[in-house]
Image (cartoon, rainbow, N blue to C red):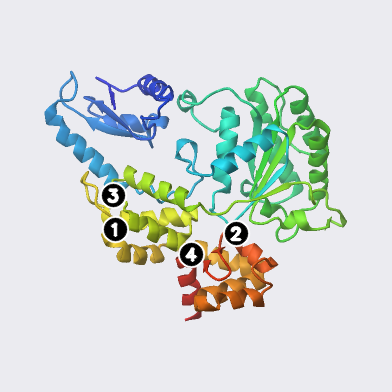
């Protein structure tokens, strides 16, 4: 809690963030701060401070000397109103900072690979957490790469161990080599300017201009450089953009020459990296990238996520809820959050109290609400479309497993190359099937979805 007599200033919150930053035991939550003041327009004042908009709750009291016991009821009402109106589970953007849960081994591995100048391909289903993982690593390695306000920068460690250039191909409205180079040049120049390195992005970018800027970046700092290309699938679907092979060849040459340029590319699958030829030439990235598959959370991380987020919205998440949620999602991060969102809608939405309702008694209704959530159904639709378009045999295997008795599972695997075969491997890499050949485990939501399509 931050108590400020009179009008709240940005410097008041800055001082609070400094205290939180030095809280080594992490007992203070920087994302939920009660700002108490006698200022009459406190809530609107906080809206004017960018860093306060999402993380601060306004608590207005009457006495200029500070809140009294009589104001405690008002605080309960403020907190209750927040819990009743803000569904923290229904977050669609990549998670950042302290909100990142799990993935400890993957974070350590990717951090080491970037520092060593390795090139990595991260693959997995959409909304499974690839961008969150990358952002966690790049935010830690290069706090200057984070798009934040000056106030928010004060709670970041400003010491960079790498220079990160994060690009998302979804930012390109018209896919062409020139547009890709324009995005890369713009990101490079912006990050270099923060290091005091003066270089301007060309109006008409070319491969030569991009190479010049990249050489300047490599030549003026001893830090490793990390170029991230997120959603790389858009570069080659439905067909590779013309000139893509030349760009990839240049990047590979610079990475091998300097040993300080790490490339991190993320997408659904490594299709581009498995083709022997690209644009009629030998594929420059075939066998180059270290392939990493990002699957769902394990059960411990899934439980941690549901319990932690549940506490933040005032839910008493019980052991039966944890087991049921994992059975229905198998740890897919977005689906797991949507299950929590179903619980929030049932037990918290519109209820302006600070009581913590228990969840275990409401699981049947929660499953119904979960099945009806659009975000959950979209994930199932995307999985179905991806497999049926690219991996038909794997899709047939998944459909057989979902729609038939578990007693027949081993036979179905044998029909499709066995448990160690290609189709089974694809499903296990995506995290859609786990367990054993005799007792495979599939998300109950996906099982329900595939069955309902056949009905």
Taking the spot 33% from the left edge, 42% from the top edge, the residue there is 312
Corner quadrant of residue 36 = top left
Q: How far apart are the two marked residues, 3 and 4, measured between alpha carbons?
A: 24 Å
> Which one is earlier in the sequence, the residue at label 1 or at label 3?
3
> Which one is earlier in the sequence, the residue at label 1 or at label 4?
1
Q: Front-most of 13 and 419?
A: 419
**Rendered image: mark on residue 360:** 1
| Residues packed near mark 3 inside 10 Å, few (<14), some (14 to 19) or many (20 plus) | some
Disc 2 + disc 3, Cβ < 8 Å? no
Disc 1 + disc 3, Cβ < 8 Å? no
Count the marks. Answer: 4
Q: Left of 393 or right of it: where is 438? A: left
Classify mark 1: helix, strand or loop. Answer: helix
| Residues packed near mark 4 inside 10 Å, few (<14), some (14 to 19) or many (20 plus) | many
Query: In x, y percent, where is residue 320?
Result: 33, 58
Query: In x, y percent, where is residue 224?
Result: 70, 29
Q: Is residue 213 above or below residue 368?
A: above
Q: How far apart are the two marked residues, 1 and 4, measured between alpha carbons?
A: 20 Å
Mark 3, residue position: 316
Q: How far apart are the two marked residues, 2 and 4, measured between alpha carbons?
A: 12 Å
Classify mark 3: helix, strand or loop. Answer: loop
Q: Is residue 254 above or below residue 334?
A: above
Q: How far apart are the two marked residues, 2 and 3, measured between alpha carbons?
A: 31 Å
Q: How far apart are the two marked residues, 1 and 2, measured between alpha carbons?
A: 30 Å
Corner quadrant of residue 200 = top right
Mark 4, residue position: 443
Query: In x, y percent, where is residue 82?
Result: 28, 42
| Residues packed near mark 1 inside 10 Å, few (<14), some (14 to 19) or many (20 plus) | some
**Rendered image: mark on residue 430:** 2
Q: Left of 232 or right of it: where is 275? A: right
């Amino acid at each position: 809690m931050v108590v400020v007599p009179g009008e709240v200033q940005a410097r008041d919150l800055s001082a609070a963030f400094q205290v939180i930053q030095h809280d080594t035991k992490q007992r203070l939550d920087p994302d939920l701060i009660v700002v108490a003041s006698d200022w009459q327009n406190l809530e609107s004042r906080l809206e004017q401070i960018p860093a306060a908009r999402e993380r601060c709750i306004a608590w207005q009291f009457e006495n200029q000397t500070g809140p009294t016991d009589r104001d405690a009821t008002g605080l309960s009402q403020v907190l209750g109103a927040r819990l009743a109106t803000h569904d923290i589970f229904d977050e669609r953007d990549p998670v950042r900072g302290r909100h990142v849960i799990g993935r400890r081994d993957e974070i350590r591995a990717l951090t080491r690979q970037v520092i060593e100048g390795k090139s990595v391909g991260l693959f997995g289903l959409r909304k499974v957490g690839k961008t969150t993982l990358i952002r966690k690593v790049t935010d830690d390695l290069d706090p200057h790469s984070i798009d934040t306000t000056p106030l928010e920068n004060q709670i970041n460690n400003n010491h960079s161990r790498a220079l990160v250039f994060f690009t998302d191909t979804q930012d390109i409205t018209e896919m062409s080599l020139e547009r890709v180079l324009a995005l890369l040049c713009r990101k490079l120049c912006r990050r270099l300017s923060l290091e005091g390195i003066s270089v301007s992005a060309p109006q008409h970018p070319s491969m030569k201009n991009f190479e010049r800027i990249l050489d300047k970046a490599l030549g003026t700092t001893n830090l490793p450089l990390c170029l991230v290309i997120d959603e790389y699938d858009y570069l080659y679907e439905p067909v590779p953009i013309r000139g893509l092979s030349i760009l990839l060849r240049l990047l590979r040459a610079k990475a091998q020459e300097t040993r300080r340029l790490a490339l991190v590319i993320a997408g659904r699958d490594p299709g581009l990296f498995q083709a022997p030829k690209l644009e009629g030439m030998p594929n420059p990235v075939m066998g180059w990238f270290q392939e990493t598959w990002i699957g769902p959370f394990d059960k411990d991380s899934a439980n941690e996520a549901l319990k932690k987020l549940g506490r933040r919205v005032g839910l008493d998440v019980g052991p039966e809820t944890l087991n049921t949620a994992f059975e229905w999602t198998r740890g897919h991060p977005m689906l797991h959050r949507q299950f929590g969102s179903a619980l929030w809608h049932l037990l918290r939405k519109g209820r302006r109290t600070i009581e913590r309702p228990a969840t275990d008694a409401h699981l049947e209704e929660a499953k119904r609400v979960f099945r009806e959530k659009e975000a959950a159904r979209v994930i199932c639709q995307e999985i179905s479309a991806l497999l049926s378009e690219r991996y038909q045999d794997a899709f047939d295997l998944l459909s057989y497993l979902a729609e038939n008795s578990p007693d027949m599972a081993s036979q179905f695997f044998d029909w499709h190359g066995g448990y160690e075969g290609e189709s089974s491997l694809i499903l296990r890499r995506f995290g859609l099937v786990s367990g054993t050949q005799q007792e495979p485990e599939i998300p109950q939501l996906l099982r329900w979805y595939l069955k309902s399509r056949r009905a």
